[in-house]
Amino acid sequence: MHIAFNGWFWDQPYTGSGQYIRALIPALHTIASAMRLSLIVPEHVTITGDIGAEVIRVPLPFGGNIGKVLFEQRIFPHLVGQIKADLAHVPYWGGPLRSPAPIVVTIHDVIPLSMPVYQGGWGPKLYTGLAIAGAKGAVHIITDSEFSRQEIVARIGVPADLVTAIPLAVGSDLHPRIGAERDPEIREKYHLPDSYTLYLGGFDVRKNLRALLAAYTYVGPSAGDDYPLVLAGKEPGAWGSPRFPDLKADIQRIGLGQWVRWIGPVDEADKPGVYRMARASVFPSRYEGFGLGPLESMACGTATIAADASSIPEVVGDGAYLVDPDDSRAMGGAIIATLIQDDLRESLRNHGLARASNFSWNRTARETLAIFQKVIGRRVPSC
């Protein structure tokens, strides 16, 4: 069996699609080394070491969004035919309309269809229409959760039996002890307080940070001096739009400045330490295709509070304290209880570690391989 992969996001490890492809290919090679894997990437992409796949670099005639669409719709399928692949896998929502080999597409979420604020102008809307058409032409669609599977069936209009939910995983470095010797260095690098509540993620409107800030109006007066709220992640270019509400203005308006610390984006190598050193972490998001953040937190042994919404409950199970994303008082109460009750925090830590152990890239690869084999009717011996 010969599988060709669209590697557009390979050099973007901070994106979910980039993390996915960089973890999936080596895992597939580990479980089925007899399978031939080819990764097709633009020529500027840097790849070091043995990734378990043949790398094919191709020039792009244009940059930007035009170059991306040309790569997806013409260059990638052309190379798929040229190398005579049995099947092509596009590990994000950008499958070609035509391909010489069957196409499997992974759609992590359908946020532009579910939340109008993410639809953008005419350009993004045209691209979304193209992506929908490509998805409808795929022989199978993989997604990250049962929640996303149901969203895809309802909003794209594909048969339910052509969509399979395969959960993601986190790296082995996200661990309560491995790498902990670097924690003092990480604390100094990000100027982290001795103890803190952590939010690590994006700041767009679906992440529901306004509810978290409102929750901290209850936490701050009782525990904020001992456990300030650390906000970690890449800030938008400009605040104050329907997609990026002005959180900094909100903090000043409601008087949270003394209890909130901004530390900016966190390097991937430093994330385990930032999670580990937190007293608790909070993920108030209203919509996630999977919810890697809570899983990362649980894997690091951090007591985790998360929204009872979208895919998050099926990911965290009993490993996190679930709260209504619209009830800031309840969220604040959950944070206070987790911060000050040692037995609750230890229970969340233990349940979270147990839950996180159910997810592995080996499992993701095996279930993905089963889809490939089903689609082209050919078995590959697994290791």
Image (tube, rainbow, N blue to C red):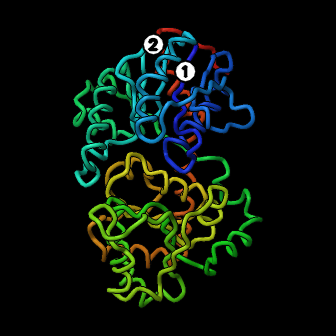
| x then y, percent, for residue 177 | 71, 59
Q: Residue furthest right?
A: 181
Residue drawn at (47%, 85%) of the image: 259
**Number of other residues with Cα within 10 Å of mark 1, as a class: few under 14, some 14 to 19, many 20 or more:** many
Which amino acid lies under the numbered mark 1 shown in the image of this protein?
Answer: Ala
Identify the mark nearer the N-term, 2 or 1.
Answer: 1
Image coordinates of residue 355 in percent, x first then y, are: 52, 50
- Check if mark 2's residue and mark 1's residue have beta carbons within 8 Å: yes
Q: Nearer the viewer, residue 332 or 139?
A: 139
Answer with left or right where residue 130 lies relative to residue 198: left
Which quadrant holds the C terminus? top right
Q: CA distance from mark 2 to mark 1?
A: 9 Å
From the image, tell me which residue sits under label 2: 101
The answer to whether 93 is drawn above or below residue 177 in the figure is above
Q: Residue 282: percent from the left, percent from the top?
A: 45, 67
- Name which residue type carries label 2: Ala
Residue found at the very far front of the displayed protein: 61
State the residue position of label 1: 4
Q: Is residue 259 left or right of residue 12?
A: left
Q: Which of the 4 image quadrants contains residue 187?
A: bottom right
226 sits left or right of 251 in the view: right
